[in-house]
Image (cartoon, helix red, strand yellow):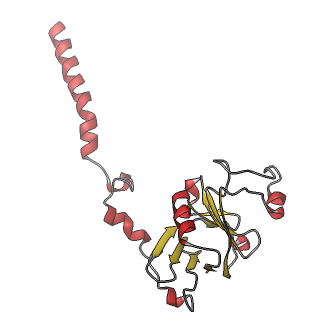
Amino acid sequence: MFWNTRRHFLASGTAMLAIPALAQTDVNEATITEVEREVSNTARHNVSSFRALDWKSYFLNLNNGAILVDIASRALHYWSEDEAIYKLFPSSVPLSEELTRRGTTQITQKIIGPSWRPTPSMLKRNPEWPAFIGPGPDNPLGTHALYLGWEFYRIHGTHDTRKIGRRSSNGCIGLYNRHIAELFDLSKVGTQVLLI
């Protein structure tokens, strides 16, 4: 009887150890996560919305360089004045059409370590927000800000990287901090900006 119980215990224990291996070999396609799939299968979804563009379709010239923000594809394009540099960055865009401004403007000011004050309409919608946040990790403008010719509108960084690629701002265009630092160095006061 002891051997019978021991054999039964060993057999059932071995079977229990094999279950995870069996479960791993019988994986249904529907249960595979995007991370586990081949890159070629998942990259296809973003190809049409995140593509290189030609500046000639949007600007008359590249005087002072040019920045195009495509709200629909959530991408920012930059061309240098001499056409030697073209950059394409993923961006965050305004939450709604009501908050979205489209048209032509330019960079009017560049600030490293910007301070942030919510606009009067932001404070009306969110009275619990602070009236001022200085430079640092809690600042919604990230590490760098490019001020535009429109009051309250900026292209800036963000410490909250979950916002990039989403409708998440109150009107501004957000970039990863490393990308806004790169764009900050490439652009200048007077760089053309077009939001479409």
Is 89 on the left-hand or right-hand side of 41?
Answer: right
Snapshot quadrant of residue 70: bottom right
> Is residue 109 or residue 10 the one in the foreground?
109
Q: Give residue 42's position: percent from left, percent from top.
A: 37, 64
Total labels: the figure holds 0
Q: Is residue 104 visible?
A: yes
Q: Give residue 91's position: percent from left, percent from top.
A: 56, 66
> Is residue 38 or residue 100 the one in the foreground?
100
Quarter containing the C terminus: bottom right
Q: Give residue 81's position: percent from left, percent from top.
A: 52, 82
Question: Which residue does the image show at 69% across and 57% down from the upper left?
Answer: 114
Is 151 on the left-hand or right-hand side of 62?
Answer: right
Q: Give residue 12's position: percent from left, percent from top.
A: 23, 23
Question: Which residue does the image show at 75% across and 68% down from the upper left?
Answer: 152
Question: Which residue does the image show at 48% across and 72% down from the upper left?
Answer: 88
Q: Can residue 165 be seen in this view?
A: no
Q: In this view, does 126 lie above or below 187?
A: above
Is 64 on the left-hand or right-hand side of 83?
Answer: right
Quarter containing the N terminus: top left
Q: In this view, does 89 lie above or below 30?
A: below
Q: In this view, does 68 lie above or below 131?
A: below
Snapshot quadrant of residue 146: bottom right
> Is residue 4 or residue 109 the one in the foreground?
109
